[in-house]
Amino acid sequence: MKQIISKISKTTIPSKIIQKSKKEIADKVYKLVEKEIQKYSEVIELEFGGSYAKDTWLSKDADIDIFIKFKKSISEEKLESISKKIGFESLKKYSPYVRYSQHPYVEAKIKNTKINIVPCYDVKIGEWKSAADRSPFHTKFMKKSLTLKMRNEVRVLKTFLKINGIYGAEIAKQGFSGYISEVLILEFGSFENLITSISNIKENQIIGKTSKSFDTSIVVIDPIDSNRNLAAAISNENIGKFILISRALKEKPSLGFFKNKKQKISNKFWNNLLIIKFEFKSRSPDIIWGQIKRATSTLSTQLELEGFTVLRSKSYTDQQKEAYLLFFLESTKINETYQKKGPEFFREDSTHSFILKNLKNAELVWIGNDRKIISLEKRKYVDAVSFMKEFLEKSLQVGIPKGLQGDFKRGFKVFVGNKNLSKSIKEEAAELISVDGTLLHFN
């Protein structure tokens, strides 16, 4: 494995030319923001944050984060208002826009480099007023703690996570953040040690030190805040992928783990895909992703309640105007009847009321071997498309988050299969009917 890590490490360290270019952009933006903050007495200082400041960035996708530290006495409204003014004014030549975390922040792009102007409070450690307040402490801690070798090992880990589709803290991905990558390398000392340890990790195992208990698949403690579980933001699917590919890499080390795996699609299942398509009014990517993920979860529940078995589901948006809610069903058509189990015959009152109610409406009623009264009911819907269309027309408030209801009222489409999908959407939908790429490493 050491040879593989050495080869990958050479490709992940940014060249001197790229480092120089990134520094020029960072210094230019810093000066623009520094000039702008002079207008506001509420601002205490500026500092670089994120992977750029900690020297753990990957050359192809390094963001530059600049944190504006505000006096802790000012209100959240004022912090948001002033930071947006500073961000928009300092980045006005680069078409800035607002993104959302706990607080809105301003983002822009310069030569394919994302610039984030992020507000936070100038607080003492542990006296957090917002989630971003920890970031300057993260930067200081990692700059002090990570050796040069460890920084390069972080780059190898990030590349490994990224190529396997589980890197990125944004809500669309729910993967491993850059900071978690740093914490894991710091905890285990190297990429190889991490892979060995993750291969043998136990359920609910705690990485780090804390006196608090957490109910997540694994627990990764923030070194500067022992009450914070960094793994809480990672989906179980992505934690599972990390564990499985770590085991596979440990068993058969290969450069293939750092190359894209082509999906193995089962084309026979295209007609098992139920798809809802709608257009939305422009909003922050973080907001629309949150809304469509909630809608997908709620509608999966409604499909199950109606008798349709949802095997997998996902959501997708182009982040501009179109969104898709995708459901892989065991079948898009189900039987006209279903079995409904009632109380045991020893429960006199409830048995009596169940029989009286169901004798009128059920196709059949009988006593089962498990002592329960059973009725055979007729379904209202046997077709998933018909059910979903009517549900969205009549019960929009039950299944769709408030923020999306206006978009749905303007129109939506419900259909089965891939005939109405563009190439890019088809690729997203195909994930639901594919063998998970991380499992292919076991071949």
Image: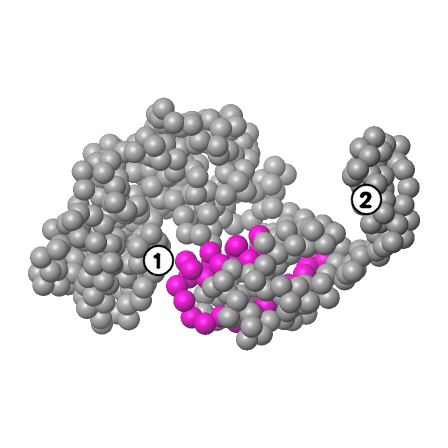
Left or right placement of residue 260 versus residue 159 in this view: right
Callout 2 amino acid: Phe
Residue 354, numbered label: 2
Residue identified by numbered label 1: 100
Q: Is residue 279 magenta?
A: yes
Classify 335 as above or below 230.
Answer: below
From the image, which quarter does the C terminus lie in?
top right
- Give x and y (percent) for residue 412: 60, 71
Mark 2 → mark 1, Cα distance in angstroms: 51 Å
Mark toward the viewer: 2 or 1: 2
Number of on-image labels: 2
Q: Residue at x 29, y 62 (%)?
A: 107
At a point 25% along the width and 41% down the height, the residue shown is 128
Nearer-N-terminus badge (2/1):
1
Residue 219, percent across and down? 43, 32
Residue 91 lies, in percent from the top left, at 22, 67
Q: Quadrant of residue 325?
A: bottom right
Q: Quadrant of the N terminus?
A: top left
Q: Magenta span covers which residues?
A: 272-297
Q: Work out whether residue 424 or residue 259 is closer to the camera in this orientation and state it.
A: 424
Circle 2: element type: helix
What label does residue 360 carry, if any? none
The answer, for residue 23, to whether it is visible in the render is no
Residue type, mark 1 in image? Tyr
Residue at screen point 85% across, 47% down? 356
Q: Determine if residue 136 is in view.
A: yes
Could you say whether the residue bearing mark 1 is in a helix, strand or loop? strand
Residue, x 46% and y 62% (percent of image)? 288
Tell me where residue 431 appears, x and y as whole percent. 60, 54
